[in-house]
Image (cartoon, helix red, strand yellow):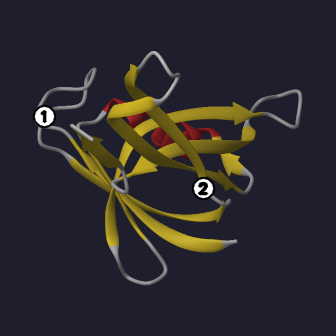
Amino acid sequence: MAYFKIEYWSSKKIGVIAANKHFWMFLDLTIGEPVETALEEGEEDGYKNFTPTFQKSTKTYTAETGLMGENSIDAVHRMKYYDDKWITLQTGEVVEMLNVKTSVEYPFDNKCFGIVRIEFDIDETIVITGC
């Protein structure tokens, strides 16, 4: 695990939180290998030859925290509702987090502590049209 800086903010009000509030946190994360998904559309001729007209490839990453308290879990979980979400990688590169999804695993019955799984895309999407 290593520490990553995550920042998020929104130009609109999120629940009782006023607009334009900027939040950041340092999380001890394990980030797994990316999963690449591909979408391809096109036309097939009479000889079953496929000619693509649109191709899109996206990489999705999954990060997992260590054991966290309830307030930290809430902060990470609510991040997905904000317009802008950014993560600073260990290289120092800052990239936007897209399509963020979160889930929580509670290893204890009292649900005061949990492990958060964060799934997100980064802007490595490749789109080819009119192939």
Three-letter residue code for mark 2: Pro
Q: Residue at x 35, y 77 (%)?
A: 93
Q: Nearer the viewer, mark 2 or mark 1?
A: 2
Q: Earlier in the sequence, mark 2 or mark 1?
A: 1
Q: Residue at x 70, y 71 (%)?
A: 1
Assign a secondary structure to mark 1: loop
Q: Is residue 44 left or right of residue 94?
A: right
Q: Residue at x 63, y 63 (%)?
A: 29
Q: Position of residue 30 (x, y in %)?
A: 68, 63
Distance CA(mark 2)–CA(mark 1): 33 Å
Three-letter residue code for mark 1: Ala
Assign a secondary structure to mark 2: loop
Q: Is residue 34 left or right of residue 96?
A: right
Report the residue marked by disc 2: 34
Q: Position of residue 83 (x, y in %)?
A: 23, 37
- In the figure, 86 relative to 80: above or below? below
Image marks 2 and 1: residues in contact by CB distance under 8 Å: no
Q: Residues within 10 Å of mark 1 (few under 14, many from 20)?
A: some
Q: Which mark is residue 19?
A: 1
Q: Residue at x 46, y 29 (%)?
A: 50
